[in-house]
Image (cartoon, helix red, strand yellow):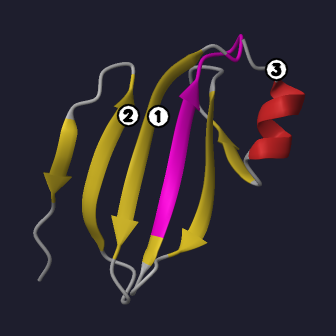
């Protein structure tokens, strides 16, 4: 199990959630365009609840998300205007 200190080292951004847990994330530029964000949700004991990969276009719009944990749910495409 990851500790708060380890999560803070691995994920440079985080926010406190109302349930006492945290939402951690890290970003990296896309290979061709946009950006990718890995988001990790943990409870107050730092137990991982969910990990999601988000893909953004060059304008910063979410175009795809992919839940990786606890169950790999595959890609979910988002409509952009």
The residue located at (28%, 29%) in the rendering is 72
Which residue occupies the foreground of this view, 70 or 42? 70
**Is 31 above or below relative to 78?**
below
Q: Which sits earlier in the primary sequence, circle 3 or circle 1?
A: 3
The image position of residue 43, as x and y in percent, is 60, 17
The image position of residue 9, as x and y in percent, is 85, 43
Disc 1 crowd, CA 10 A, few/some/many (<14, 14-19, 20+): many
The residues colored magenta run 36-46
Q: Which residue is mark 1?
A: 51
The disc placed on residue 68 is 2
- What is the distance, in whole Å, between disc 3 and disc 2 at their CAs? 20 Å
- What is the distance, in whole Å, between disc 1 and disc 2 at their CAs? 5 Å
The residue located at (31%, 76%) in the rendering is 61
- What is the distance, in whole Å, between disc 3 and disc 1 at their CAs? 16 Å
Disc 2 crowd, CA 10 A, few/some/many (<14, 14-19, 20+): some
Q: Secondary structure at mark 2?
A: strand
76 left or right of 34 in image? left
- Asked whether disc 3 touches disc 1, contact meaning CB atoms under 8 Å apart, the reply is no
**Is 50 above or below relative to 44?**
below
The disc placed on residue 38 is none
On whether residue 42 falls in the magenta region, the answer is: yes
The image position of residue 29, as x and y in percent, is 55, 77
Disc 3 crowd, CA 10 A, few/some/many (<14, 14-19, 20+): few
Image quarter of the N terminus: top right
Q: Which residue is mark 3?
A: 3
Image quarter of the C terminus: bottom left
Q: Which sits earlier in the primary sequence, circle 3 or circle 2?
A: 3
Q: Which sits earlier in the primary sequence, circle 1 or circle 2?
A: 1
Q: Secondary structure at mark 3?
A: loop
């Amino acid at each position: 199990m990851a500790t708060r200190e380890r999560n803070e080292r691995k994920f440079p951004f985080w926010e406190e959630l109302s349930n006492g847990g945290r939402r951690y994330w890290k970003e990296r530029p896309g290979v061709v365009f946009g950006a990718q964000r890995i988001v990790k949700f943990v409870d107050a004991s730092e137990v991982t609840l969910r990990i999601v990969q988000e893909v953004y276009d060059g304008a910063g719009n979410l175009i795809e998300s992919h839940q990786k944990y606890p169950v790999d749910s595959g890609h979910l495409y988002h409509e952009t205007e």
